[in-house]
Structures are given as C-alpha cells and as structure tokens.
Amino acid sequence: MTATDQLQQDNMQPLTETIFVWDFDWTVINCNSDEYVPAGFLGDEEVAERITAEMKEHGPTKWHECVANLINACMIEKGCSKDDILEKAAQMPFLIDVKQALTDVANNKQCQQAIISDGNDKFIEAYLRKNDMIDFFSNIETNVGSWV
C-alpha cells in the first residue's frame, strides 16, 4: 500500500501546495520595465536610440548598465528624482485578467507565488506596493537595483 492509499484509507487528504512562478516583464506587467520607466521621461524613440547605441558599443551582456545609464539620464537631463522614477514604475501597465489571476492564486491558501525575473528589484517592488500585490509573493528573485 502506498502512502497516498493509506491517507485515503484513513480518510485524510494529502497536503498539497502549488507554487506559481511568474516572470515580471510581459507577464505580471504588460511591458518591459527597463524600457517603460525611462521612456516615461525620455520618450520611446529616444530610449530605443540610446539602447541601440549602447548595445552596439558595449554588447548585449551590458544590458543592466545600459538601463542604469538611461535612468541616470532621466535624473540628470530631465531632473527626475528617485521618487519620480519609482512612481513611473508603479504605473506600469497590466492586463486585468492577469491581475485577477494573481489575486485568485493569492487567495488560495494551498498556493504560493514567486517572481523570477531579470528586472530591477526597485521597479518590481514599487509596482507591487502601489498595486497592493506585495504580499501576493513569497519570494522575488531578481537583479538588485541601486541609486547613484
């Protein structure tokens, strides 16, 4: 007799737990946070041009440095504060059905949720706090952002 058979025979239900693992960009939110946030200050076209130039100069392995340069440009060239940047991150677009799915899973006590992302922890945290979803996730694994 298996352990499952024994539990069913004893009229007990096995304890099950499901962990939903989400990416952040293009899943929890409906955009690329690394591009959306600076584009809010510099414009989509300017961000695209700067990313293209930096990727040509430094290569794709320097993506996070490129994003840092874009954020620094927002602060230096446009006078944005740290709070301005985080507020823009908090406003990232989402799909209503995805937010409802996140809420449904969060309300199921047999489930946990985690985010594994190459996004910036500052943007992710700002978005989740502003949209009352920070407690939906038991773990967030991502890149650490810092302010210069």
Image: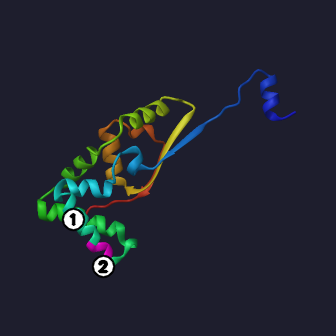
| Residue ID at (18%, 51%) | 84
Residue at horizontal 52 percent and vertical 29 percent from the top? 108
Tell me if label 1 and label 2 are in contact, CB under 8 Å.
no
Q: Say whether residue 52 is left or right of residue 99.
A: left
Between marks 1 and 2, how big is the CA–CA gap? 18 Å
Judging from the image, the colouring scheme is: rainbow
Report whether 31 appears left or right of 109.
Answer: left
What amino acid type is highlighted by mark number 2? Glu
Q: Secondary structure at mark 1?
A: helix
Q: Nearer the viewer, residue 143 or 51?
A: 51
Point out residue 111 in the picture as x, y percentages from the top left corner: 55, 35
Give left or right: position of 106 versus 30.
right
Residue indicated by mark 1: 72
Q: Label 2: state its secondary structure.
A: helix
Residue occupied by mark 2: 57
Where is residue 121? Give x, y as percent: 37, 54
At a point 76% along the width and 20% down the height, the residue shown is 11
Percent of width and height locating residue 107: 48, 29
Residue furthest out toward the bottom: 57
Is the residue 36 above or below the residue 102 in the image? below
| Among numbered discs 1 and 2, the one appearing first in the sequence | 2
Task: Characterize the magenta stretch by its predominant secondary structure.
Answer: helix
Q: Position of residue 54 (x, y in %)?
A: 28, 73
- Residue range corresponding to the magenta coloring: 53-57
| Residue 7: quarter of image | top right
The amino acid on which the numbered mark 1 sits, given as a three-letter code, is Asn
Q: Quadrant of residue 75?
A: bottom left
On screen, residue 57 above or below 109: below
- Tell me which residue sits at (38%, 37%) in the image: 133
